[in-house]
Image (cartoon, rainbow, N blue to C red):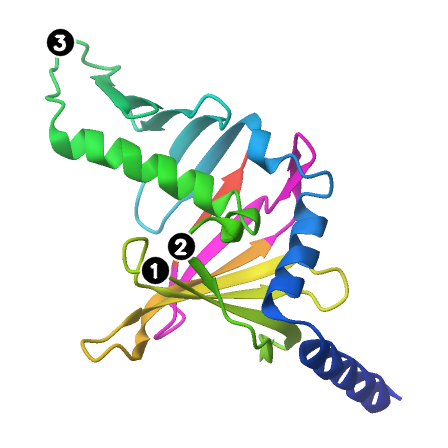
Amino acid sequence: MRFLTLLFLLVTITVQAQQLTGEQLLDKAIEHHDPNGHWSQFVGDLQVTMKTPDQSERVSDISINLPTQTFELITMRDSVMTESRVVGKEVTVVKVDLKNLNKKFETTDKEWDRAVLMKNYYTYLYGLPMKLKDPGTIITDQIEHKTFKGKEYLVLEVMYDENVGSDVWYFYFDPTTYKMEIYQFYKKDKNGAIDKNSGEYILLTENHQVNEINMPRVRQWYYNKDDQFLGTDVITK
């Protein structure tokens, strides 16, 4: 009976993959994660705690306001607090050691560039899959069905215009609910082919709702090449 159930599920997923286009799968996934279409006007706060092997925790308080193009990030690791604010093209960064307030940190172009990078990083990853509608995103029409860690998924391949990014991404969706449960990316080699020893995959579990947007509460990061665990970040508020 179990064999017949698994066979039926595999056939169902295969038929779905044949019937849906890439854009249609993306639309169904967005309907799950943003059922009321609020992402474009998203205003919300998150606290994310990152745990990585052999390092102290990093706690990040994040504020995103898409209508005003405002992004604020306060990170705390050990006693050092970094506060960055990006409003449109204006960037400010302040860094202090709470145990030694007389210690001076120089804010350089590198710090400002990192503030913008973190803005793009957090709005991209917590804005998925809605962010796949952004200009410069290339959605592959053909959907794949893959088994990952014993579960079957509908998989969407995504690439980007050269001025946006060079990595190749794969998004894994539950074939019944269309919930995004994994994303994975690879680098390209000098010949433009996918380097299977590059990149990472991220397992997404639990659910955290902010202003009716369903986000993964827990993300676990691993290297593609050897499944080495890299770290976990959890929405703690």
* SS state under label 3: loop
Residue 26 position (above or below residue 77): below
Determine which of the numbered discs, if any, sits on residue 136 in the image.
2
Q: Is residue 79 above or below residue 117?
A: above
Pointer 3 with pointer 1, Cβ within 8 A: no
Mark 2 closeness class: few <14, some 14–19, many ≥20 residues within 10 Å: some
Q: Is residue 150 left or right of residue 126?
A: right
Image coords of residue 49 (percent x, y): 45, 36
Up-down: is 61 above or below 166? above
Residue type, mark 1 in image: Asp
Which residues are drawn in magenta?
A: 205-229
Measured in 3D between alpha carbons, the distance from the residue under mark 2 to the one under mark 3, in whole angstroms, is 46 Å
Amino acid type at circle 2 is Gly
Marks 1 and 2 close (CB-CB < 8 Å): yes
* Residue on which the image places disc 1: 161
Q: Position of residue 214 (x, y in %)?
A: 66, 42
Which residue, given by chain and number where applicable, does mark 3 sit on?
102
- Residue 218 showing in the rendered view: yes
Which of the two labelled residues, at mark 3 and mark 1, occupies the earlier sequence position?
A: 3
What secondary structure is marked by label 1? loop
User: Residue 75's spot in the image, x, y percent?
Assistant: 35, 27
The label nearer to you, 2 versus 3, is 2
